[in-house]
Image (spheres, grey):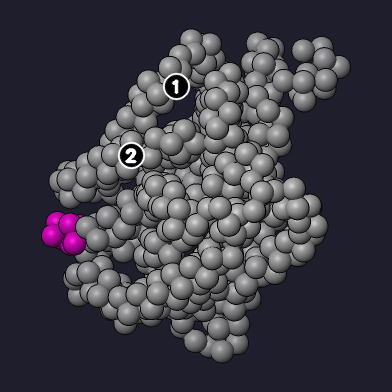
Amino acid sequence: MSSNLIKGTAILTIGLFLSKALGLLYVIPFYAIVGEENIGLYQYAYIPYNIALSVAISGLPLAFSKYVSKYNTLGDYATGRKLMKSGMLIMAITGVLSFLALYFLAEPIAHRVRTKDEQIFTIEEIAGVIRWVSFALLVVPVMSLVRGFLQGYQKMMPTSVSQLIEQIVRIIVVLVGAYVVVNFMKESPRVAVNFAVFAAFIGALASCGVLYWYWRKYKPEFDSYLMKSPPAGEISYREIYKELLVYIFPFVLVGVINPIYQFVDMMTFNDTMGSMGLAKVTDVYFTMLNFTTHKLVMIPVMIATGFSMALIPFITSYHTKNDQQGITRSLDQTYQIMIFLTAPIVIGLIVLADEFYELLYEKSAMGAEVLANYAPVAILFGLYTITAAILQGINRHKWIVLSSMLGLLCKLALNIPLIKLFETNGAILATTIGYTIAVGLNIVVIKKALNYKSEMVIRRIILIGLLNLVMLVAVFVTLKGLTAISVVDGKAHAFLYIAICAFVGAVVYGYLSLKTGLAQKMFGERLTKYTSKLGF
């Protein structure tokens, strides 16, 4: 596998990890400022915002990355630069239109979410947070297009750094703003939530500043490529966008599919729970499902997201060159590393669900149960992202649409009946079934399209599973031993137990991975030059 892919993946994954980690950690003080009841209002804003954002972007940044990479591989740098100019204008227009649409649809959405008078939030409060978050749509589409252009040149650092800065600025504004609103202005925590969602707009402005700095830095290099390129005038805008349209819809689906699943829950969960006489708790349970636990579940998914963002330009390049060996090497290593890194995190979330929930939020048997049941779905989320990226790289766009729509239709059909049977766990089960169908179909298409068969990968995934089983036993026994001495009481206590169990798990998993040679085979010379000194 290309060292550039490993490097690009590492850069994007580290940036995503830091961004996600900050996005998780800030919830602790924010939760303390606004409280369990009010934090639910926060996630009612972000689910429709994420969908509107995906529509505004229209999959163009990732499609742009693929398009630029394709023509750069052919030595045609002028076409990508030509598209950049018109793409900026289109993203600005779609950003404004999406902002207006979400702003004026806020109240109808709020009416659909609040179906019973016993629910916690009013229609005005739900509509208000949706309107405040919609302002970010004015900036984010243009920002995302620039990221896509730079990724097309295999410049992953700007995306990583800009995401991190965007998150840091947003979090500072969220926490400082919420604290000032509640403690100095003496306003309601729900007013603080309005200010907190507006922070997405301010964070996006900061990210734009970072990207502008990188653009100035790389522009001389890009200009030197442009001087060697044939003129772009030979390809019309019509031909460019006709080709891009083929790419765009599958990219939209991949980016928006998880928010759509959440939106299905948002539109059906409260009404179904209310029909069962649970209207008083439905807002809190929905917050646990789609906000508090979802933030934790998405941590393992960032690894797959980092891979997919780096994988698309490389797979496209290999496919354009008809380099079957390059594609196979990429797939082999991608599948293995993704499972190797995500599986132990998922197991940790399951075993330590009570401790994680108490550390980040508060002691809640229900919250911990939802987290433990939801955590395994993270592997499906990651596999969907990876397999969809592979299909995009080899131009199997129709199959992405088919698999995604089949999975979503299953979610729509099963959500209400399963919620009636299992309440919150029913929504999780419907999501699991939908993603399993989508991922299964994607894998079948990849195998047939690329004639991809790798018994080695299957053997290594089985080995990874066995190592995770041993780690699970070690962590479970450690936790039981700790709780036998003293039951968790407070956040500091929960953090101590998580740290001890994580250390035990990492030592066991790391030792077994090195002893069996699994880690060395996956990560190659970058790892073996260190492990050989340790006797592995």
In the image: residue 249, left or right of residue 266: right
Give left or right: position of 135 versus 118.
right
What amino acid is at disc 2?
Answer: Lys
Q: Quadrant of residue 106?
A: bottom left
Give the residue at x 74% y 48%: 228
- Mark 2 crowd level (few <14, some 14–19, many ≥20, 10 Å Cα): some
Label 1 sits on a secondary structure element that is helix
Taking the spot 28% from the left edge, 36% from the top edge, the residue there is 433
* As drawn, 145 above or below 377: below
Start and end of the magenta stretch?
A: 271-278
Residue 511 falls in which quadrant of the image?
Answer: top right
Quarter holding residue 264: bottom left
Neighbours of disc 1 within 10 Å: few (<14), some (14-19), many (20+): few
Q: Residue at 39% x, 65% y: name it.
A: 52
Extreme residue toward the right, this view: 533
Query: Mostly what secondary structure, the magenta segment?
Result: helix
User: Is 284 inside the magenta-drawn segment?
Assistant: no
The amino acid at mark 1 is: Leu
Sequence-first disc among 2 and 1: 2
Q: Which residue is mark 1?
A: 450
Circle number at residue 398 = 2
Tell me the residue at 32%/80% (across/down): 104
- Please state which of residues 184 and 86 is positioned toward the viewer in this rendering: 86
Q: Is residue 494 left or right of residue 535?
A: left
Report the quarter where the C terminus lies. Answer: top right
